[in-house]
Every structure is written in structure tokens, then in C-alpha cells.
Image (cartoon, rainbow, N blue to C red):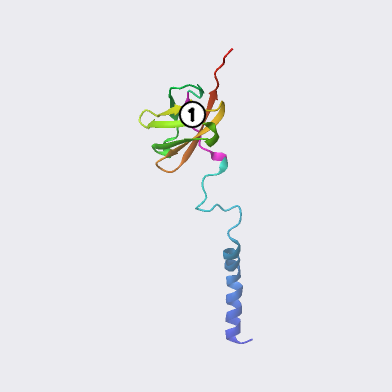
Amino acid sequence: MSNTQRRHHRFLLASAPMAALLAFGPGPNVPSSNDGPPATRQCNATLDPDTVPIQMDSITVGYSVPDSIGTITTVTPDEDSGIVTGSIDAAAHTVAVGTSTATAGDWALTFTGDSSRTCIGRLTVVGIDRR
């Protein structure tokens, strides 16, 4: 084997682990810098009240979210809930919630902050008891 062939052979042997890393990635145990927070760390919003009736007038619901989410810019209810969200008062940590077209049940409200992070709050809508 000539010196040139030996150098090429050493280069191939030395670069094989790097080529494998590039081809197959770092493996499942190494988090990527593009990954979001793990699913086990879901951000939860606390609502007050967390149970509201179906009624014609809007209801002011208070919320509490971690500071890291930033100022709340949108509140989005589950699409099938029939809940309508109105004005958000970020200073008072309240959101206007309309339930006149809502369906009774337990529904998610997704709070999105100016940091683009989200937190989920659960709102229970109860029907009118007409006994």
C-alpha cells in the first residue's frame, strides 16, 4: 500500500464515526435545540370561575398563567364548544366569555402569550336546569 493510499485509508477510518453521526443523527436521547418543551410539562392556566352556566350575557373569567408565557394576546376555545371569547384585560388577567351558543361540557381554552407560548385552561359549561 502506498503512502497516499494509507492516508486515504486513515482518513476514511477517522471520518467514519462523523459520517454515521451526520447520516443517522445524534440518537433519540439527545434533545434537539428545535424541540419544544416535553409533553409532560404542559402549561396549565387556572380559571376563576372554572364552571359557568349557559346564558345570554358574557361572563368575566379570571385567569392565572406563568409569567414566562408573557402577556396574553389571544384566548381560543375548543372549536366544538360553542364558546366565544371576547375582550382580554391583560392587566386584570380576565377574559370575557360568551356561552349563549355553548354546549354543556368540559372544554379547553388555549391562552397564547406574546412569547408565542401557550397554556391550557379547563372551563366547564353547565346547562340550565329546568325542573
Q: For the view shown, which residue lies furthest in the left direction?
A: 91
Q: Residue at x 53, y 38 (%)?
A: 42
In percent of the image, x 48 and y 27: which residue is there? 47
Residue corresponding to mark 1: 46
Q: List x then y, in percent, for residue 34.
A: 50, 52
Classify the position of the N terminus by image quarter. Answer: bottom right
- Return the residue found at the far top: 131
Badge 1, how many Cα within 10 Å: few under 14, some, many 20+?
some
| Front position in the image: 99 or 27 | 99
Nearer to the camera, 121 or 70: 121
Q: Residue furthest bottom?
A: 2
Q: Quadrant of the C terminus?
A: top right
On the image, the x and y values in percent for residue 73 come to 40, 38
Residue at horizontal 54 percent and vertical 31 percent from the top: 107
Q: Is residue 68 one of those drawn in magenta?
A: no
Q: Position of residue 16 (x, y in %)?
A: 60, 70
Amino acid carrying mark 1 in the image: Thr
User: Is-magenta flag for residue 46?
Assistant: yes
Which residue shows up at 61% across the image and 87% down it?
2
Residue nearest the observer in this picture, 82 or 39:
82
SS for tag 1? Answer: strand
Q: Residue 65's image quarter? A: top left
Name the residue nearer the viewer: 94 or 17.
94
Q: What number of labels is visible?
A: 1
Q: Is residue 7 above or below residue 43?
A: below
Q: Which portion, as a residue range, is magenta?
A: 40-48
